[in-house]
């Protein structure tokens, strides 16, 4: 199965690092023209420089803007007026005791993790429907299904994204546009290594350290290692391709078997 996305334009929100950057590289590697998004022009320019080293043939568009605001979303839309593929990857997370999450924190998680994705969907889905082809994806999390006690605001925002994906898939029914969410599991992104070494023996090499971390602190994982960002990107690239034309309204898991369920 050789995915060819040449001629397609893609926007990946929150793509200056981590899973978003891996998705940007994956889509670009398959031939798409990829718009890179982050809050500042500098972080986006630096990310594009790194991506160009990985994919020298690819075309990247700088699309800076804080999409948790209407102005920022407009700025991104100006940089990329049409997208065939929209990957709503932006998401923030952090631990906080349930009873200490303030109204403002709840609002912030809704605005950044949910509303920003809805806003970008409203911006690009009509054009995709008009063209009769498009792909919208939302990067959710195992926390959408297994609500973590230490970050219920994050979990709730990710559960909401599953519903948002299902809802917009209905809106796009019969148009040639597919809409899905991807349930990502614990992934090896910036900061995670430090977090792992806070909990296991600092002298262990990374491979053993992460296995020890997973065995002790994430025993539900069937993979028993962290997921690499590229492994999430592979699912996103497949879903963005024509090969996935019959998959819509779904929640697809790349969680290393973390969620103990047969269905999502
Ligand atoms: N990491 C995991 O283990 C894991 C597991 C399951 C699901 N996920 C989900 O996967 C997604 C990516 O996670 P990650 O760990 O790769 O994230 P990350 O490393 O924290 O990266 C976040 C990205 O979002 C950008 N960003 C932050 N606020 C923004 C805003 N308001 N507007 C535009 N861009 C903004 C940042 O760029 P700038 O700093 O340049 O603005 C950065 O590129 C999230 O939705 C997360 O919930 C992650």
Image (cartoon, helix red, strand yellow):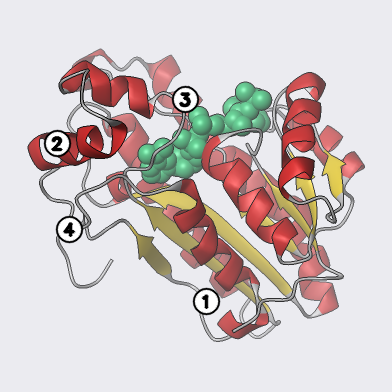
Per the image, label 3 sits on a secondary structure element best described as: helix
Q: Position of residue 152 (x, y in %)?
A: 27, 32
Dot placed on the residue nearer the N-terminal end, 4 or 2: 2
Residue drawn 79% across and 34% down? 49
Whole-number angstrom distance, CA of label 3 to CA of label 4: 34 Å
Up-down: is 164 above or below 20?
below
Of the two numbered discs 4 and 2 in the rendering, the one whose residue sits closer to the viewer: 2
Q: Residues within 10 Å of mark 2 (few under 14, many from 20)?
A: many
Q: At 57% across and 59% down in the image, what residue appears? A: 137
Q: Kindly identify which numbered label has been placed on residue 248.
A: 1
Circle 3 residues within 10 Å: few <14, some 14–19, many ≥20: few
- What element does badge 1 sit on? loop
Q: Nearer the observer, disc 3 or disc 1?
A: 1
Query: Which structural element holds mark 4?
Result: loop
Element assignment for label 2: helix
| Marks 4 and 2, how far apart at CA | 14 Å
> Above or below — where is 60 with respect to 135?
above
* Most foreground residue, 15 or 250: 15
Q: Which residue is mark 2?
A: 212
Label annotation for residue 222? 4
Tell me the distance, in whole angstroms, between the alpha carbons under discs 1 and 2: 37 Å
Tell me which numbered mark, 3 or 1, is placed earlier along the sequence. 3
Position in image of residue 43 (x %, y %): 73, 23
The image position of residue 194, as x and y in percent, is 34, 20
Residue 185: x and y, percent? 33, 49
């Amino acid at each position: 199965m050789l995915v060819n996305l040449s001629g397609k334009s893609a926007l990946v929100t929150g793509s200056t690092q981590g899973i978003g950057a891996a998705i940007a590289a994956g889509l670009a590697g398959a031939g798409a023209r990829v718009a890179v998004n982050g809050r500042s022009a500098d972080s986006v320019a630096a990310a594009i420089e790194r991506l160009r080293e990985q994919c020298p043939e690819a075309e990247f568009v700088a699309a800076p803007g804080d999409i948790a605001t209407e102005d920022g979303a407009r700025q991104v839309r100006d940089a990329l007026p049409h997208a065939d593929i929209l990957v709503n990857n932006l998401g923030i997370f952090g631990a906080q005791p349930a009873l200490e999450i303030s109204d403002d924190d709840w609002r912030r998680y809704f605005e950044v993790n949910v509303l920003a994705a809805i806003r970008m969907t409203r911006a690009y889905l009509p054009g995709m429907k008009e063209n009769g082809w498009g792909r919208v994806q939302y990067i959710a999390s195992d926390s959408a299904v297994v609500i973590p006690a230490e970050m219920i605001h994050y979990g709730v925002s990710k559960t909401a994204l599953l519903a948002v994906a299902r809802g917009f898939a209905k809106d796009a029914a019969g148009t040639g546009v597919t809409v899905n969410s991807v349930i990502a599991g614990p992934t090896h992104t910036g900061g995670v290594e430090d977090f792992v070494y806070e909990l296991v023996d600092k002298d262990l090499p990374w491979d053993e350290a992460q296995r020890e971390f997973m065995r002790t602190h994430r025993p539900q994982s069937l993979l028993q290692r962290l997921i690499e960002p590229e492994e999430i990107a592979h699912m996103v690239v497949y879903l963005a391709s024509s090969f996935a034309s019959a998959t819509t309204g779904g929640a697809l898991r790349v969680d290393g078997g973390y969620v103990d369920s047969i269905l999502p």
